[in-house]
Image (tube, grey):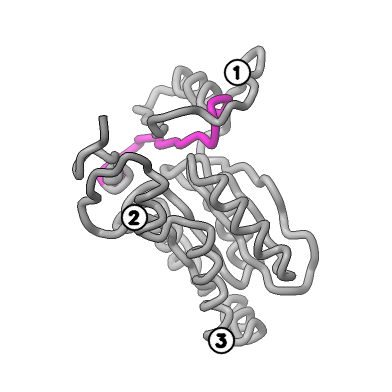
Amino acid sequence: ANDGPTHHGLFDIAYLRCVPNLIGMAPKDEDELVDMMFTASRQSHPVCIRYPRGNAEGVPLKAEPKAIEIGQAEVLQPFSRKSGRKVAFFALGNLQKLAQEAARQLAAEGFDCALINSRFFKPIDTETTERFARAADVVVTLEDHVLAGGYGSAVLEHLSNCRVSTPVVRIAWPDQFIEHASAVETLRQKYGLTAENAIARVKAEFAIAPIDLRREFAIA
């Protein structure tokens, strides 16, 4: 059966982020889901784990689960060089493949792309977020959630507190109820949760102001 307009599960991060002491995680695949369940069992605080319906990624599972440090993201791919146009992708949960495809296409055009598996939407990895945002010319957040109050909002809040002015492109669902569909990919195409849209928006940011000027403001 198809999901209805209120059953896509796109609103939970917004209302969970405001709960004190809550830990919120989203795995990139089924192996990391097992690690997160193991990690959750060792906590004294409430924990929620977001995972999508449908088929898993098909990755092999470790023999024994591994505990994840709370609030620590996973750097899948750092920047590869000191100069050039730099884009940092922070993907939460099941949007890793979308981020990887966007990064792959941008890299083919000469962009230097970093890939970060965010893992946590509360608490977010503030150190990794700030470090990559200061090094990047553009930050991209990707999440299977509405724009309002989601993971991208948490990133924006933290960078504002740190006075980091690097532009942030947020790839997420719009502020509306999403209709029925037989496949989520159809809806993602319609609402812009695609590698093509992420790439277009990144390039639009580079067209707004020179890279050197951005870095000057970010360091100031």
Examine the rendered structure and indicate whether residue 116 appears above or below residue 191. above
Residue tagged 2 = 173
Q: Which residues are magenta?
A: 15-32
Mark 3 → mark 1, Cα distance in angstroms: 46 Å
Q: Nearer the viewer, mark 2 or mark 3?
A: 2
Residue tagged 3 = 209
The earlier-in-sequence mark between 3 and 1 is 1
Is residue 131 in view? no
The answer to which of 125 and 207 lies nearer the viewer is 207
Mark 2 → mark 1, Cα distance in angstroms: 32 Å
Percent of width and height locating residue 21: 35, 36
Mark 1 burial class by Cα count in 10 Å: few <14, some 14-19, many 20+: some
The earlier-in-sequence mark between 2 and 3 is 2
Res 2 quadrant in image:
top left
The earlier-in-sequence mark between 2 and 1 is 1
- Residue at the limit of the structure toward the top, as seen here: 63
Q: Secondary structure at mark 3?
A: loop
- What residue is rendered at 63% in x and 68% in y? 136
The answer to which of 72 and 3 lies nearer the viewer is 3
On screen, residue 197 versus residue 153, left or right, reads: right
On screen, residue 38 versus residue 13, left or right, reads: right
Q: Amino acid at mark 1?
A: Pro
Q: Nearer the viewer, mark 2 or mark 1?
A: 2
Q: Amino acid at mark 2?
A: Trp
Residue tagged 1 = 65
The answer to which of 175 and 150 lies nearer the viewer is 175
Percent of width and height locating residue 198: 51, 63
